[in-house]
Amino acid sequence: MVNFHYIFIVALVAAVASRTRAFVARPIVSQNQKKSSANGLKRLQAASVEEDVSSTDFDLLGLPARPGRPLKVAIAGGGVGGLTAALCMLKKGFDVKVFEKTSAFARFGGPIQFASNALSVLKEIDETLFDRVLDKFTFTGTRACGIKDGLRSEGFKMTDDSLDYLWNEDAPADWFVKFPLKQCADLFGLPYTGVIDRPDLQEILIDECNKIDSDFIQNGNPVVSYTNKGKGKGVTVELQDGTKYDADVLVGCDGIWSAVRAAMYGEEIKETSADRMKRQGCTYSGYTVFAGETVIKTPDYYETGYKVYIGPQRYFVTSDVGDGRIQWYAFFALPPGSKKAPSGWGGSTRTEQANPTENLVEYIKSLHEGWTDEIMTVLDSTPPESVEQRDLYDRYPEVFRGWTDGNVCLMGDAVHAMMPNLGQGGCQALEDAYVLTECLANTKSTEKVEGALKDYYNKRIIRVSIVQFLSRLASDLIINAFDTPWSPHDDKGKSWKSYLTFFWKPVLQFLIFPVQFAYLYSYYPSGSMGDLPAKLEAKWKAEHEKSAEIEFARVAKEGQKSAGPSFFQKANAELSNTVLQAKKNLSEE
């Protein structure tokens, strides 16, 4: 049955968000700036007819349909954001070089979530890219996603999130609130939220870039610093082997421990305070997370996308990631440095387990004593040696320092690392890449590069800051303000937080979550895709069940397999050898 109250709220928020986005996209221009723009136009016109000798201090920048030389861009970091930016810019005709720290790309890493707004950006960047990503995609937003009661849920039941349990003792109270992912995507005519394995995404992006320029990337030699050469004169990029590279623009998308940001803000890479609460300008969130992956056919496998189990001082997340696999995350409010498990995702160095003999699955189960058997079932099927852990750091919005320094800018986790709760980290990096490329593509002279980078910052800062805030708020509320919801039929939720959680339910269900997801999806440069999302879902559904059943049969016959060794464990060793050899070669020359 259609909930018209819900639709009205979502539509209203979407309209406001759309108008806000349009306003943000138009920076305020003073009379002096207008005069400056007019003067810049006159200089360009004079240069085109060779009437003004002074204008030759700057180069005309061309596109395939516009005279001038290509803009030369150096990109620090070959992750999802860096490769997406490279593809955007190569398609515009830029001269692009990516500098990546790993000596060679290999298949590594787990799934990454792309929400509807990110899929819209992918389609606007390139139709072929969009099609190839969707071929490897697992939709989660087409199915039930939301918050479950971590203590009362049982049997992987598919029930409603109504309040029937208040007066019906036999009514299940497992689903607390379901997320309106599908409804909000339908509102804008967008494909549904889902996940793709990082190795698949990486291979697609590299392949599409190689089609345009087979020499676009240099591995094993990361950017360590830079020197601005002045307005319109570009930047000298300093690499780890001691060599230098000149470009018009340097884009720093080298992750949360960014060398480019360190040079821009005067930070020390990975410098950590004595209490570990600060690390290279990033703040410890208060949470550490354990993660694992397993293949298991739960009774609700085909009906649920991802579930967030809430309870006292922690929460547990499971998500279908395709081919019968379930990835889980266990969030705990623990001090930084409470290391138990190795860490090897997100670009971090693979570490050793603190106690090699400890069964990490049993340790995580001990922290969920009294919780639902649904969590225990998933944990029991997980190989203990596959469990990893990392402390979660994020950043405050850079509303005062900005993201630019002359001919250098930052994007992605390098400048706005955020908590993973909304799955928007990668999505916002894609939006950055698209907006930055559009700003630079409209730049007709090297004289205007600095202004274009500031324009990119102005267009992104409000939206990114809101998403950062929402991502942190989601974590803080779940751990610090939520508890097992109150019920009149048992004693599992009797604290003041339990009563507060109970009263939050209608606010979350009918206001906060519709507003939140409508805002996240309100950036959609592709426009509505009509009936395409429904067609994509129908095609995927049959393929998903087939591939999952094959994997379920394999596990039943062969047993679980733990994840392979982290790519970063090998990559860091290879990187050291590569840089040492490069320095040796340089000295011999």
Image: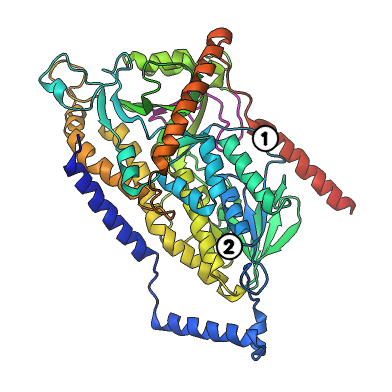
Residue 543 in picture, x, y percent from top left: 49, 27
Residue 571 in picture, x, y percent from top left: 68, 35
Q: Are marks 2 and 1 in contact (CB under 8 Å)?
A: no
- Considering only vertical position in the picture, is 356 above or below 428? above
| Magenta stretch in the rendered image | 324-352
Residue shown at 38% from the left, 35% from the top: 141
Q: Which numbered disc, 2 or 1, marks the residue closer to the eye?
A: 1
Farthest residue toward the right?
588
Residue denoted by label 1: 106
Residue denoted by label 2: 408
Dominant secondary structure of the residues highlighted in magenta in the image: loop
- Considering only vertical position in the picture, is 434 above or below 146? below
Visible in this render: residue 231? no
Farthest residue toward the left?
167
Residue shown at 16% from the left, 13% from the top: 170
Residue shown at 33% from the left, 38% from the top: 182
Q: Which quadrant of the view contains residue 136? A: top right
**188 to the left or right of 486:** right
Residue 299 lies in the magenta-colored region: no
Three-letter code, disc 2: Val
- The crowding category of the residue bearing disc 1, from other C-alpha atoms within 10 Å (few below 14, some 14 to 19, many at least 20), is some
